[in-house]
């Protein structure tokens, strides 16, 4: 015997199956699954006259019969974590690692995968095409042969204005020393000379303006313009690193500069073509200025790639902040690239800007990565600073979908340790957020333009409220394109979300979404069959304990009845025979 409830919503069926202990939509329920109750309640879900009618009733669930052969599509890392820590012990915050010379061997990559790397990032600014290809092949090999599930992201070089002193190490700029910034091209280095990579870099700059290198590594005052070059005096001594970035200031204010350069350079396009041919999962676009470049790239990918490659916009300039909402709307996700952002805006503004961006992303339901200098000191040292741990914790408390390592994993000696710090710190803060019940503090904005989209959204909002109120152990979602999984994730539920999909690119894309464990499964149009099969398999693997309850959500649309959308919510526990 089990409890079963139906919610009927314009052809949408919602089922509740299981032990109902608390309140659903404010309706008090008996604590025993062996009760008989029938209640109705109207609930407006949109501006239209649509209403939800909730009917709770007792129904007998048939015994499951024999277990079928098959795989649940679990990757080895999630499977191990689930067995060791149980449902609630699964980490929700996703981890991205930049791959560089310190971690590019098969062995090192496997160690990162074991330690929880969900996405590997390749920065196209560095190294050769062959090097990147080799890393991608190794990751695919690990996924295919050893059962990991690591997605691949390429990060474009972009049209960045950089200055270089021509030496491979850093150079010191002393106070009052005179330097010449030039656009002239020459090999090697010349004393007190810095090459800029763009002819127009000094356009609109006046004498008396300040040049700040890498967000404050050193500062110069412009003495005079000489052709396209600038003669400058060092006013704040410091270090000049190779390929440094610069910002211009006048009267204490940043000079917003719109260089007439396309967001995607010729090299970026060739890297994108390479990425498509290597079957990558994400393209992170550097120095996005507006939504246009993102829309253009997405259109290009739709026509050239059979796979749904996701486009992430990197927020790392003043212009991107000014057009934040349109960029978030146009893209599949966002990276808060705090490194270059800190060159473009005053450092003290970064924490509030990060908070605002993560908030907008949640509202518009796009995954967001917090990147750069999370554990910067670990490039050199085996432990993080207390301030770094606090920074990581704050990003987790803001419910960022993912955290990213840059130099810590790419060139650092303690990449594995840094990843472990991200893992333990995020797990701890997630637990604290659950105890505080911070999810309820978040406001949401309606996303769906069409009624079916609004229905999907409302189902997910209600499903998460139910899951949290009922204290279920896990949410199962059956999804083709990941929409329902992301709408559930957006609500940041207490239990983990297991997203079953038969689409490989959906699985790899969901790797970036908070709290979602994506699983590749052989789904049919028969929802009851899908649920039964996966629950039986997960039970057979010993992943469900006797007293655990699961909430099931689906958006599988049967091909034969494409006009009608059958979406459902069910709650299952061991009292129902099919568990
Ligand atoms: N593929 C690589 N090969 C060699 N060095 C790398 C590679 N990837 C990263 N690095 C090194 O790691 C450091 C940090 O990496 P990351 O790519 O995050 O730099 P970044 O400058 O912050 O990124 P971006 O250029 O996108 O702003 C780089 O300065 C570079 O020295
Ligand atoms: C990641 C990156 O591009 C930055 O922080 O600038
Ligand atoms: K880059
Ligand atoms: Mg950057």
Image: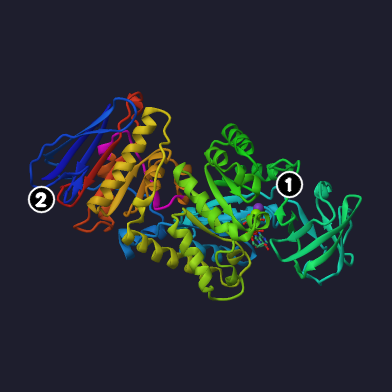
Q: Which residues are magenta?
A: 513-529
Residue 545 drawn at (x, y percent): 23, 59
Residue at 83% x, 63% y: name it.
166
Looking at the rendering, the quadrant in which ligand 4 lies is bottom right
| Residue 556 in sight here | no
In the rendered image, the vertical position of residue 494 relative to residue 378, given as above or below: above
38 to 80, vertically: above or below: above
| Mark earlier in primary sequence (1, 2) | 2
Q: Which residue is mark 2?
A: 32
Q: Is residue 231 left or right of residue 52?
A: right
Disc 1 target residue: 257
Q: Secondary structure at mark 1?
A: loop
Is residue 445 located in the magenta-colored stretch of the structure? no
The residue positioned 37% from the left and 33% from the top of the image is 454
Quadrant in which residue 85 is drawn? bottom left
The image position of residue 161, as x and y in percent, is 75, 51
Whole-percent x and y of residue 550? 25, 50
Q: Nearer the viewer, mark 1 or mark 2?
A: 1
Q: Is residue 546 left or right of residue 229?
A: left
């Amino acid at each position: 015997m089990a409890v079963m409830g139906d919610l009927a919503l314009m052809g949408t069926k919602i089922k509740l199956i299981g032990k109902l202990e608390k309140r659903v939509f404010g309706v008090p329920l008996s604590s025993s699954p062996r009760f008989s109750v029938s209640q109705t309640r109207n609930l407006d879900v949109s501006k239209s006259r649509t209403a939800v009618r909730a009917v709770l009733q007792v129904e007998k669930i048939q015994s499951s019969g024999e277990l079928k052969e098959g795989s649940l599509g679990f990757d080895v890392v999630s499977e191990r974590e689930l067995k060791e820590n149980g449902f609630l012990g699964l980490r929700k915050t996703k981890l991205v690692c930049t791959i560089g010379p310190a971690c590019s061997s098969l062995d090192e990559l496997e160690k990162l995968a074991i330690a929880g790397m969900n996405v590997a990032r390749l920065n196209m600014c560095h190294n050769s095409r062959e090097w990147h290809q080799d890393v991608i092949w190794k990751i695919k090999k690990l996924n295919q042969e050893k059962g990991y599930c690591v997605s691949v992201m390429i990060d474009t070089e972009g049209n960045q204005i950089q200055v270089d002193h021509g030496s491979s190490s850093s150079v010191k700029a002393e106070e009052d020393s005179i330097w010449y910034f030039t656009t002239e091209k020459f090999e090697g280095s010349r004393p007190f000379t810095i090459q800029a990579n763009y002819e127009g870099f000094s356009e609109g700059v006046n004498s008396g303006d300040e040049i700040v290198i890498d967000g404050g590594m050193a500062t110069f005052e412009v003495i005079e313009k000489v052709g396209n070059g600038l003669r400058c005096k060092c006013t704040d001594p410091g270090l000049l690193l190779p390929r440094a970035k610069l910002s211009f200031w006048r009267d204490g204010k940043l000079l917003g500069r719109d260089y007439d350069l396309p967001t995607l350079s010729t090299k970026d396009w060739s890297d994108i073509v390479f990425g498509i041919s290597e079957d990558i999962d994400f393209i992170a676009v550097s120095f996005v200025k507006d939504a246009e470049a993102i829309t253009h790239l997405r259109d290009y990918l739709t026509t050239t790639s059979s796979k749904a490659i996701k486009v992430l916009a990197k927020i790392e300039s003043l212009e991107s902040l000014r057009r934040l909402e349109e960029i978030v709307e146009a893209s599949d996700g966002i990276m808060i690239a705090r490194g270059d952002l800190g060159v473009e805006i005053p450092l003290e503004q970064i924490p509030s800007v990060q908070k605002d961006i993560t908030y907008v992303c949640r509202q518009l339901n796009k995954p967001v990565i917090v990147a750069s200098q999370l554990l910067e000191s670990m490039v050199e040292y085996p432990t993080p600073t207390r301030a770094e741990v606090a920074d990581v914790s704050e990003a987790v408390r803001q419910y960022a979908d993912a955290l990213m390592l840059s130099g810590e994993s790419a060139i650092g000696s303690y990449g594995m340790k840094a990843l472990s710090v991200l893992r333990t710190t995020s797990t701890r803060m997630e637990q604290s957020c659950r105890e505080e019940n911070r999810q309820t503090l978040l406001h949401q904005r309606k996303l769906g333009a069409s009624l079916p989209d609004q229905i999907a959204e409302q189902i997910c909002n209600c499903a998460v409220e139910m899951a949290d109120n009922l204290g279920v152990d896990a949410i199962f979602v059956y999804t083709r394109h990941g929409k329902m999984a992301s709408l559930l994730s957006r609500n940041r539920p207490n239990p983990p979300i297991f997203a079953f999909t038969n689409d490989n690119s959906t699985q790899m894309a969901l790797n970036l979404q908070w709290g979602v464990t994506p699983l590749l499964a052989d789904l049919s149009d028969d929802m009851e069959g899908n649920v039964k099969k996966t629950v039986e398999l997960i039970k057979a693997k010993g992943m469900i304990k006797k007293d655990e309850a699961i909430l099931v959500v689906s958006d599988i649309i049967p091909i034969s009845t494409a006009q009608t959308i059958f979406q459902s919510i069910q709650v299952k526990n061991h009292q129902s025979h099919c568990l």
